[in-house]
Image: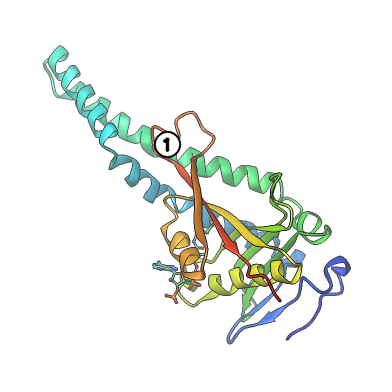
Amino acid sequence: MQGVIDTVPHTRLMCQEETMPDYVIRLYKDSDYEAVRDMFSRGINEHTKAAFFHTLSLPHVWALLLAVFLVLLQTTGSYLLPTMAVSLGVAGQWLMNRHVYVTYVSHSLATDMTNIRKYYLQRDGYCFWVAELAGEVVGMVAAIPPDSPTGENQVELKRLSVPAKHRGKGIAKALCSTVIDYARRRGGSAVLLSTSLSQNDASKLYLKLGFRRTTTGYAPFIFAKFIDFRILFYQYDIPVQR
Ligand SMILES: CC(C)(COP(=O)(O)OP(=O)(O)OC[C@H]1O[C@@H](n2cnc3c(N)ncnc32)[C@H](O)[C@@H]1OP(=O)(O)O)[C@@H](O)C(=O)NCCC(=O)NCCS
């Protein structure tokens, strides 16, 4: 099923379907809307747990919880209040981590993923693919021009997700390769992306595909440093064709 999608005339040569052994990677269709939004939300929100345990493993968080416990124990002489305070502190860590992911998902669903066709398939330099297996959407990925002054001639990979039951089959690898190929055919010099520290599987995937980590930063939340919520930036350099 190798071909060009007529509904995306501005990307006729750059935005095409690719056949894989047991699933097809094709352009997004409106009938994928609910599946894609649901897959994206689940794929992001599932990282709350890993991020929470990462926060709990931080020495300064332990030190703070211990200090609160000891000070309250000293002042009240009872274990009840210190235990409650520490429990609240731990619950707070969970809520802070959850807040970052939930906010990101809500923002994404309310912006580029509100009208996916319009945002991704009707503008030059934007594209959105899904992986389909036996009529079911089993993966998604998007490409956009990077929002940076140095982003000219580069492509940003976004919205990569594969549902848990379809992981480990090489679907994400094929979706990333689709974006790399798209960038190459547009004459791009690199594919950029960002992910959070807790998205371990994603980082392993990107390194395996030949991406290199370029920099890290904190998420734009006041408590991001405290919970060590880091964003990792990756880049895949496309070899110059002679
Ligand atoms: C990250 C994600 C997309 C990977 O999807 P996938 O289809 O399972 O990945 P693939 O099967 O294509 O794996 C490709 C490579 O990534 C690496 N990889 C992926 N998951 C891994 C894991 N759990 N442990 C170790 N390596 C892993 C492997 O090196 C694998 O190559 P190999 O099969 O040759 O060993 C998927 O876990 C996911 O959707 N997670 C939730 C959403 C998310 O984090 N998206 C990334 C946004 S930045």
**CB at mark 1 closer than 8 A to ligand 1?**
no
- What SS does tag 1 mark? helix
Coloration of the structure image: rainbow
Closer-to-camera residue (187/155): 187
- The structure residue drawn at horizontal position 14% and vertical position 24%, both measured from the top left corner, is 79
Q: Position of residue 111 (x, y in %)?
A: 71, 45
Q: Quadrant of the C terminus?
A: bottom right
User: Visible in this render: residue 240?
Assistant: yes
**232 to 126, vertically: above or below:** above
**Dot 1 corresponds to which residue?**
95
**39 to 232, vertically: above or below:** below
**215 to 221, vertically: above or below:** below
Q: Where is residue 119 in the image (x, y as percent from the top left)?
A: 78, 54
- The structure residue drawn at horizontal position 51% and vertical position 76%, both measured from the top left corner, is 170
- Horizontally, residue 213 falls left or right of residue 187, namely left
**177 to 212, vertically: above or below:** below
User: Visible in this render: residue 138?
Assistant: no
Q: Which quadrant of the figure has residue 160?
A: bottom right
Q: Position of residue 150 (x, y in %)?
A: 69, 48
